[in-house]
Amino acid sequence: MVKLRAPAYAERETAVLDYLRKHGVATTDEVCDLVRASPATVRRDFTAMSQKGLIIRSRGCIQLAASAQQSPVSQSLTISNAKDEEKSKIAKLASSFVKEGDCIFVGAGKTCNLFSNYIKDIGHLTVVTTNITVVLELASCP
């Protein structure tokens, strides 16, 4: 007889959140069957997820908290898109300090990638970087 082990907490959390996104509500018994874990383990998981603000607990069931309605990827994309305009403004302002003939270092990150767009037209510029995106962006510049 093969004994199935219960998945680790992170796997159970992901499975529960996916289930809640599809069904809206889940009972303790449904989650026990879903993640192959005991009711005590599931209740501990519910406590942890509730403390993280991922779920709202009711007697015998849980539902998805408003903050967890989106998947983690779409949440990070929303945050990223909201910050892109700010990052672009920072990059543009930083580029105003760069003059022809300067030697500069450009680091890693989205703001630095945007910065490289603004400095493309500055002539005789020496750029030192570890950022491959910046290298590719500036490779065609004189």
Image (cartoon, rainbow, N blue to C red):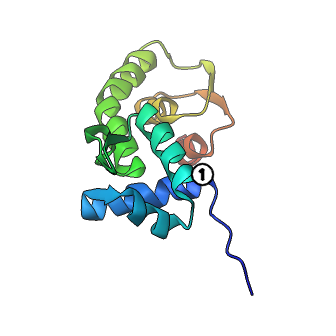
Is 24 in front, or is 29? 29
Residue 9, horizontal then vertical, whole percent: 59, 51
Looking at the image, residue 94 lies above or below residue 3: above
Q: Amino acid at mark 1?
A: Tyr
Q: Residue at x 27, y 56 (%)?
A: 25
In the rendered picture of this protein, how many numbered marks are placed on residues?
1
Q: Residue at x 51, y 30 (%)?
A: 112
Residue 126, horizontal then vertical, whole percent: 64, 28
Looking at the image, residue 119 lies above or below residue 12: above
The residue indicated by pointer 1 is: 9
Is 54 in front, or is 88? 54
Question: In this image, 51 relative to 125: left or right?
Answer: left
Residue 11, horizontal then vertical, whole percent: 57, 58
Looking at the image, residue 130 lies above or below residue 72: above
* Quarter the N terminus occupies: bottom right
Is 11 in front, or is 127? 11
Question: In this image, 81 relative to 7: left or right?
Answer: left
Residue 106, horizontal then vertical, whole percent: 60, 27
Q: Quadrant of residue 46?
A: top left
Is 98 in front, or is 92? 92
Q: Residue at x 25, y 40 (%)?
A: 66
Question: In this image, 42 relative to 89: left or right?
Answer: right
Q: Residue furthest bottom?
A: 1
Q: Residue at x 56, y 40 (%)?
A: 134
Residue 121 seen in the figure: no
Residue 11 seen in the figure: yes
Looking at the image, residue 124 lies above or below residue 37: above
